[in-house]
Amino acid sequence: MDSLSLLIDGFGTALTPQNLLFAAIGVVLGTAIGVLPGIGPAMAVALLLPVTYGLEPTAAFIMFAGIYYGGMFGGSTTSILLNTPGESASVVTAMEGYPMAKRGRGPQALAAAAIGNFVGGLIGTVALVLLAPAVASLAVNIGAPDYFAVMVLAFIAVTSVLGRSRVRGFASLLIGLTIGLVGLDQLTGQARLTFGSLHLADGIDVVIVAVGLFAVGESLWVAAHLRRTLDKPIPVGRPWLAGSDLRRTWRPWLRGPVIGFPFGAIPAGGAEIPTFLSYVTEKRFSRRKDEWGKGAIEGVAGPESTASASAAGTLVTMLTLGLPTTAVAAVMLAAFQQYGIQPGPLLFERESALVWALIASLFIGLVLLLVINLPMAPVWAKLLRIPRPYLYAGILFFASVGAYAVGGEVIDLLLLFAIGVLGFAMRRYGLPVLPAVIGVILGPAAELQMRRALQLSDGSLVGLVNSPMAVTVYVIVAAILAWPLLRRLVKRPSGDEPKDPAGV
Amino acid sequence: MSSPVSTVEEPRAAAPRQSWWRAHSELGICLLLLVLGVLVLTDALTLPTDFTQRGPLGPKAVPVVVGSLLVLVALLLARDVLRGVTGEAEGGEDVDLSTGADWRTVLLLSGAFLANAALIDLVGFPISSAVLFWGAAYALGSRNPVRDPLVAATVSVVTWLAFNELLGVPLPGGPLMGVL
């Protein structure tokens, strides 16, 4: 098998002392970040983007992947011990995990979550190894129209599937696209939206946009509404599982990836939807329905395994199509762009060593995470007591370090602040941040592909839809756009008056 | 964001008007989108395209589309807001939405951030960043006169060393690091 030998080569690269060190840094940092409130893996990777100036790509991506997986592991700790999910992926875990901890079954809940993450991540990563090269070789012949169609799908999906209000999603996307327009036009070199500023002619660095929206915006938003009284986490010992627990958890662990992996791979918001689906599924299969809501261990095991597998699914789409389906993937894509590497079908050919080292490091990361998390859960729980002023001061501190390191210019700090204020306003009025980030990262590429496609067809719009793949993708886009309308048509005969006029 | 008209004489009339603006402050976002849209459109339409045109679609096309959509979304959002459908403020672990916004903290925090921007080229990264960290911690309610500056100084000096020595990304040391 070809990909097997490539994977073994990848292990060779990933197991060098230096890369092993970066994998370890990544998973420890990722777990800490997952545990820490207010800071998610996307913000963490964004804050770490400046290391791309000093590190070689393989080491940087091994570290980022560790953060992604580690964040999934760590997020469950806050859910279980504090009832406040660290990331959106672990919202569902709190529903059964916190009642378990309150009943004194915290160690079992943590163990079910950690092993669930390991199993889910392992199965998901194996699926990644099997699927990604196939997808990449299928996609290797896709042309500019197909790329453009896929990017349009990403734009529409991220604004329509996520969040409560489409209008606000689109507003956010357009803000991102506008920021992406700033700078010299890639084909003709003409300055757009630069207002004569030489600094803006280079465009606004994506590091500044990502850090501004995620980190500075979040810090300002938290500052306006800082919770003065902190909840006390439930004290906990070493995680462990009894045989009776194992009998209840192994099926949910194995079912998780079946739901999580495909959902991670499509642009449907990462882990939120699949973890909820897993919860519902496990509840249906459970023989002890009376326990649900009071701490059923299946409700922790299933969703956590699902969340981890969805992270692997996300990487498939990101690496093979260059399409980010979650905020973390979007920021990782930005990191690829910093190195001048374009993720996509050709990545597996051109950067074969890098990709397989990255995939191998995922396996290593999972083992490290299990080893680190099972015995050290009580230590991680202590992180929850970090004084909030230091936490957010630290976030602002590293945000400004990152922006300044881009070019050593004060104007970047001012831009960072302006974008942070924008992020604050977006949080205040319910504009989701992710569409804006996707708009900044994919916008310029989408424009380039569209103009290339039209160049080939000599300006005829048919050039955008002259491949079966592009047509298929546009049908999906149309279906997503028409969905609220269709739903209303379906509902009307039953006499159900739609109550919220929010769907525009 | 939008401030009420200040020509109202009776305070009784002013109160409901102010609360109307408060309830509909999201219109400020509509205004922002509208201004952004007009800006993008005017910038695109003033682009000289008679030369260097390659391919059927010049550099104008996408900005025109984005600008028009911005204006459209601004109007749709305004309709939403006037109908009473307002955006939901984002929650979070450390976010308590039951109280009003604490603007003093936000302004202090912004001040700390901007102080760093003003100072970094004058006194160097270690000092200006320590000011940022200490100021931010103070703004957020930390008042320990010994531990706060100590933590701030440690974090900034360690970061400076890590970036200069380990990552090879030079940050200005300033006069202080020149002496050491």
Image: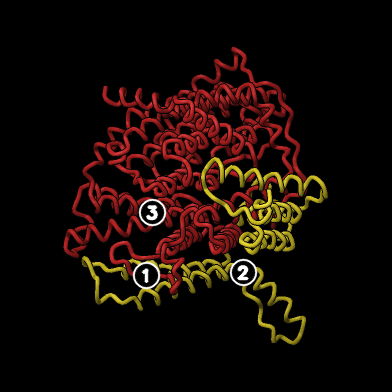
Mark 1 and mark 2, same subunit? no
Vertical order, A404 against A35 (above or below): below
Which one is in front in this view, the residue at disc 1 or the one at disc 2? Answer: 1
Which one is in front in this view, the residue at disc 1 or the one at disc 3? Answer: 1
Residue, disc 1: A191
Q: Report if the CB atoms under discs 1 and 3 are less than 8 Å apart.
A: no
Q: Amino acid at mark 3?
A: Leu
Residue, disc 2: B25
Q: Amino acid at mark 1?
A: Ala
How far is disc 1 from disc 2 in space, using C-alphas?
Answer: 34 Å
Query: Could you say which chain is coloured red in the image?
Result: A
Q: Which chain does the residue under circle 2 lie in?
A: B
Q: Report if the CB atoms under discs 2 and 3 are less than 8 Å apart.
A: no
Q: Secondary structure at mark 3?
A: helix
Label 1 Cα neighbours within 10 Å, binned few <14 / some 14-19 / many ≥20: many
Query: Could you say which chain is coloured yellow in the image?
Result: B
- The numbered mark, 1 or 3, whose residue comes first in the sequence reads 1
For the point 53% across and 34% down, which residue is it?
A26
Residue B52 in percent (x, y) is at 24, 71
Q: Is A251 placed left or right of B25 in the picture? A: left
The quadrant where residue A385 appears? top right
